[in-house]
Image: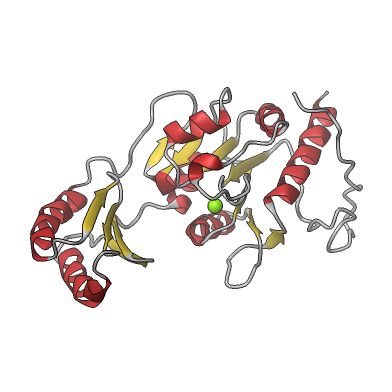
Amino acid sequence: MGAKKSIEMPNNKPNNKARNRLGLPAELLLTGRSALFLDVDGTLLDIAPTPDAVEIPADLLDTLSSLQQTLDGALAVISGRTIADLDRLFHPLVLPAAGQHGFELRLDAGPIAQPGGTDTRLAAVRARLADLTRAYPKIIVEDKSHTIAIHFRATPADEEPLRRQLNLIVGEIPDRPLLLAGKMVFEIRPAGINKGTAIEFFMRHTPFAGRAMVFIGDDRTDEDGFRAVKAGGGLAVRIGSLAGSAADCALNSPQQLRAWLKGEAARLARRGA
Ligand SMILES: [Mg+2]
């Protein structure tokens, strides 16, 4: 258990300056009627050289547990990791969670729903990729069940022909899946499922429904979440720069976010007591 050293927040006066004395945006305030959505890597936790090397600061679990209680359970993690991985990270907490960018959804400690689970669009992609592998034997196809990655690190000169072939493949499939280009990799995933649809899922269910949304993220894949939250009148917060982002305000670092969450947890707990 971490030391209960609370951070005193200034009074929430209507004419608060744009940034309060902790250097935080003035609109960053939770109430007992907030629904809080948190990305994990690069947002709640500092980025580590490998996903397995991330560290959970000692008092973060206390903070999240306290917020879960004061928000009546309306706190969810929205991540690219699998939910099994999130449970391992946040043990012993079992949080409402969206894994694999919304391809896995879990409202509470119950079963995990997979909105893209038996996706026939990707089944069609799989069949076509078998032919592609014969034509380009050096590519590596990594099937992550909800996303298929086509690595061409061993044959970089094939990038453009591969892109053309993959565009043809996804183009022939109804409800055309997305083809995304990364570093030495292409990724194919079904369209229509992302962090935004994940947040919308939670907002259709108790205890989230009807609450004021706050989503905090740091990356390109969080922009779908920012847009969904703003469309619902909520607050979108980015860790890092606001340049090119749909977010309303920014925090500097995961460390600053954790300090803010800790302060808010203490403030809400005092109120509820
Ligand atoms: Mg992130």
Residue closest to the eye, 133 or 147 = 133
Give the image location of residue 226, x and y in percent. 56, 58
**Residue at position x 62%, y 72% in the image:** 243
Q: Position of residue 152 (x, y in %)?
A: 26, 64
Which of the pair 90/13 is nearer the observer?
90
Residue at the image position 22 percent from the left and 46 percent from the top: 119
- On screen, residue 59 versus residue 85, left or right, reads right
Q: Position of residue 145 (x, y in %)?
A: 27, 44
> On the rendered structure, is 112 left or right of 72?
left
| 209 w.r.t. 180: above or below | above
Q: Can you see residue 205? A: no
Residue, x 49% and y 27% (percent of image)? 108
Q: Quadrant of residue 54?
A: top right
**Residue 1 placement: quadrant:** top right
Of residues 72 and 168, the one drawn nearer to the viewer in this rendering: 168
Residue 124 image point, x, y percent: 14, 53
Relative side of 175 to 134, left or right:
right
**Where 137 falls versus 161 (above or below)?**
above
The image quadrant where one finds the C terminus is top right
Q: Is residue 42 visible?
A: yes
